[in-house]
Amino acid sequence: MYEIKNSKQVELSDRVRFRCIRCGACCRNVEGAVVIEAKDGYYLAKHLGITVSEFYEKYTRMFLLEDVEFPIFTLKVTGKDKACIFLNGKRCSVQDAKPRTCKMYPFWVCPDDKDGFQYNFSTEQSHHPKGSLVRVKDWMRDNLSEEDKEFFREETRAMSEIAPSYNILNKCLKDNTTIIEKVIFYRHLLYETDEPFMPQFKRNNRVLKDELERIIRKFTDI
Ligand code: SF4
């Protein structure tokens, strides 16, 4: 789970001072920081009128999480100030389809242990915790959609099934390239943008889980 440093936990009922001066600073020096979840990749590809594979190829960079070697995608950056590839001057060029983390920023959420969410407010930018009061509940209503919440729940559920198999294979196999490719294919690439996202995401998670378990069985039968 990607977490933003320098942040504090908040409650839905809290009011937080926040000021945006539209300087674009949040979109600079973001190398490896703007994580692209499967849902983001699908909606950005749809917005840009390209296939999901083309989107990942052109606009993202893949890296493996330390220790677990799990593939994660982040947006590419450009220029000396390592600006997000979608930053145009001080404006986001994909405003209507920007990734969930960008939509929510400077707030961010993570699942709690009661099937709900923990809410956080980032204080990374010193000019943010100033200005008028924002009610956390209103911000979430406007920037965390029902589909986002459904995605989060399915992601948490699916990862609890996929991660154990992935870890076993990582330890057993000398070369884990095929496993990494499978995860990338099912979790990020296998989507038609003219079909709804969530049913495809759920199907892909099911197939990936079965595939990894099948490989483990094959491996342990040898
Ligand atoms: S996608 Fe848009 S909002 Fe997000 S970092 Fe890039 S330019 Fe900024």
Image (spheres, grey):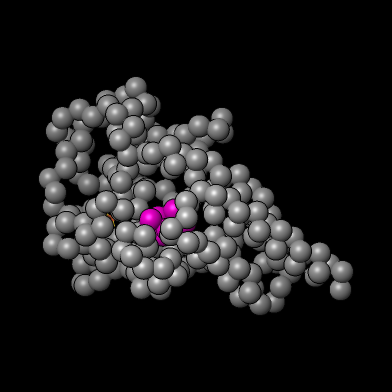
Q: Quadrant of the C terminus?
A: bottom right
162 sits left or right of 78 in the view: right
Of 62 and 88, which appears nearest the observer? Answer: 88
Q: Position of residue 219 (x, y in %)?
A: 80, 70
**Rendered position, 219 above or below 37:** below
Q: Position of residue 7 (x, y in %)?
A: 34, 41
| Magenta region | 37-43
96 sits left or right of 189 in the view: left
Residue that sits furthest to the right in the current view: 221
Of 49 and 128, which appears nearest the observer? Answer: 49
Q: Residue at x 71, y 58 (%)?
A: 210
Q: Position of residue 178 (x, y in %)?
A: 63, 74
Q: Position of residue 151 (x, y in %)?
A: 49, 45
Q: Residue at x 20, y 72 (%)?
A: 80
Residue 95 seen in the current view: yes
Residue that sits furthest to the top in the current view: 13
91 sits left or right of 155 in the view: left
Of 62 and 3, which appears nearest the observer? Answer: 62
94 sits left or right of 57 in the view: left
Of 140 and 123, which appears nearest the observer? Answer: 140
Hey, which quadrant is residue 28 in on the image? bottom left
Q: Main secondary structure of the magenta part?
A: helix
**Rendered position, 121 above or below 31:** above
**Rendered position, 222 above or below 130:** below
